[in-house]
Image (tube, rainbow, N blue to C red):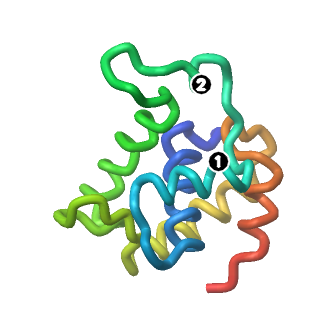
């Protein structure tokens, strides 16, 4: 049985946050939404500050994952600090949501996030 990759768990959280926010979808708002709703499990390393910039490791990590989403056309790209989900991103969100709901061993996605996934109405 294949486990959901960590990258896909993070992709799901980013897409989910952007989808729920709808407006004013900036980097800070998307990441704050994930944190404020307790959607992600953090380990000690995640909560350390990057040595080269004043940013927590997990926020920097998710910014890289978001770059992949933009490259894949799942997030708007080319507009500074616009982290809005695209139509293609919504399709991917549905797919990753189904994967997460069938994955017993999620590493980063919390039960709060699963509840929010269960409340999605596309």
Report x, y in % for residue 55: 43, 30
| Label 2 SS | loop
Residue shown at 56%/39% (left/top)? 5
Which mark sits nearer the N-terminus, 2 or 1? 1
Report x, y in % for residue 31: 52, 50
Residue for badge 2: 47
Give 97 or 77, whichever is nearer the viewer.
77
Report x, y in % for residue 76: 29, 68
Give 26 or 95, whichever is nearer the viewer.
26
| Label 1 SS | helix
Q: Is residue 98 left or right of residue 86?
A: right
Residue shown at 28%/66% (left/top)? 73
Residue for badge 1: 35
Q: In which quarter of the view is residue 44 placed?
A: top right
Q: Is residue 89 left or right of residue 35?
A: left
Q: Is residue 85 left or right of residue 98?
A: left
Say which quadrant the C terminus sits in: bottom right
Say which quadrant the N terminus sits in: top right
């Amino acid at each position: 049985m294949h486990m959901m990759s960590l990258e896909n768990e993070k992709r799901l959280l980013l897409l989910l946050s952007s989808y729920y926010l709808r407006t004013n979808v900036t980097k800070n708002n998307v990441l704050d939404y994930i944190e404020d709703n307790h959607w992600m499990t953090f380990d000690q390393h995640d909560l350390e500050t990057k040595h080269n910039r004043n940013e927590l490791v997990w926020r920097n990590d998710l910014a890289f994952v978001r770059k992949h989403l933009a490259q894949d056309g799942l997030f708007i790209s080319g507009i500074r600090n616009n982290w809005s989900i695209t139509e293609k991103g919504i399709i991917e969100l549905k797919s990753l949501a189904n994967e997460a709901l069938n994955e017993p061993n999620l590493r980063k996605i919390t039960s709060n996030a699963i509840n929010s996934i269960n409340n999605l109405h596309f």
